[in-house]
Amino acid sequence: MVPRTRTDAVAVRIPRRRFTTEEYHRMGEAGVLSANDRVELLDGEIVRMSPIGTPHASTVARLNALFSRRLGGRATIWVQNPIVLDRYSEPQPDLCVLHARADFYASAHPRPREVLLAVEVMDTSRGYDRTLKLPLYARAELREVWLLDLKGQTIEVYTRPALRGYREQQTLARGGALAPRAFPSVRFRVNELLG
């Protein structure tokens, strides 16, 4: 009889070092991260972003044109630029609608209270946007987030943030219409947003 060998499966916890937004910026200033690095800081980790494909890029350009035309000077349209959620997170949503400011946020990146709407375009980043970024947006209390699903041809609308996610979620298909809560009279058709 061959003696059995017992293998204990032990969960190994590897300590991770979380970076702050201040440290993240210093890495850029020191040349550790360059302007060509497509990264963002999420919950203290520097995460590489997916390359931007043609459908994604054209959708962001369309959103920029539509929101800029419809909102005029009532808001700042912030395209693929950083927002500071907290000490450990500085994502770059595809588009944000911000409170209008005369300095266009020259003194500091926007904070959650200044973000009226964040929009993410999902092409190859569906799981990443839903499972990683959306919970961070909820925890930071971003009041409204739209996820444009290019493959599913739908728009997911998330409102009423809480620590564990958004309490309200609605999915709109082609033929539907929606408006940002901050500007309820400014309507968009799902078809025009998705293209």
Image (cartoon, grey):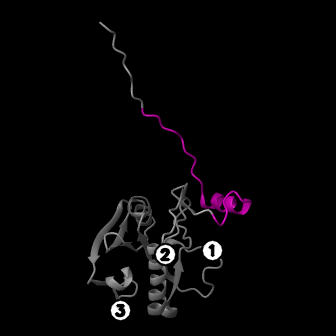
N-terminal of the pair, mark 2 or mark 1, is 2
Please tell me how crowded label 3 is: few (under 14), some (14-19), or many (20+) other residues with Cα within 10 Å.
few
- Local secondary structure at mark 1: loop
Rendered image: mark on residue 57:
2
Name the amino acid type tagged 2: Ala
Q: Is residue 102 above or below residue 15?
A: below
Q: Earlier in the sequence, mark 3 or mark 2?
A: 2
Q: For this rendering, which residue is in front, 143 or 6?
A: 6
> Crowdedness of circle 1 by 10 Å Cα count: few (<14), some, many (20+)?
few
- Main SS category, magenta section: loop
Q: Name the residue: 46% across, 91% down.
A: 71
Secondary structure at badge 2 equals: helix
What's the residue at 50%, 62% (across, down)? 50
Where in the figure is residue 131, as x and y percent of width and height? 39, 59
Work out which quarter of the rendered image holds the C terminus and state it. Answer: bottom left
What label does residue 170 carry, if any? Answer: none
26 left or right, relative to 55: right
The disc labelled 3 sits on which kind of residue? Ser
Q: Which residue is mark 1?
A: 108
Q: Which segment is the magenta one? A: 11-36
Name the element at disc 3: loop
Nearer the observer, 152 or 13: 152
Mark linked to residue 185? 3
The reply to whether residue 116 is in sight is no
Q: Which residue is pictured at 49% across the width and 84% down the height?
A: 64
Marks 3 and 2 sit apart, C-alpha to C-alpha, by 27 Å
Front of the two marks 2 and 1: 2
Amino acid at dot 1: Ala
How many other residues sit within 10 Å of disc 2, few (<14), some (14-19) or many (≥20)? few
Residue occupying image coordinates x 40% and y 61%: 135
Q: Quadrant of the N terminus?
A: top left
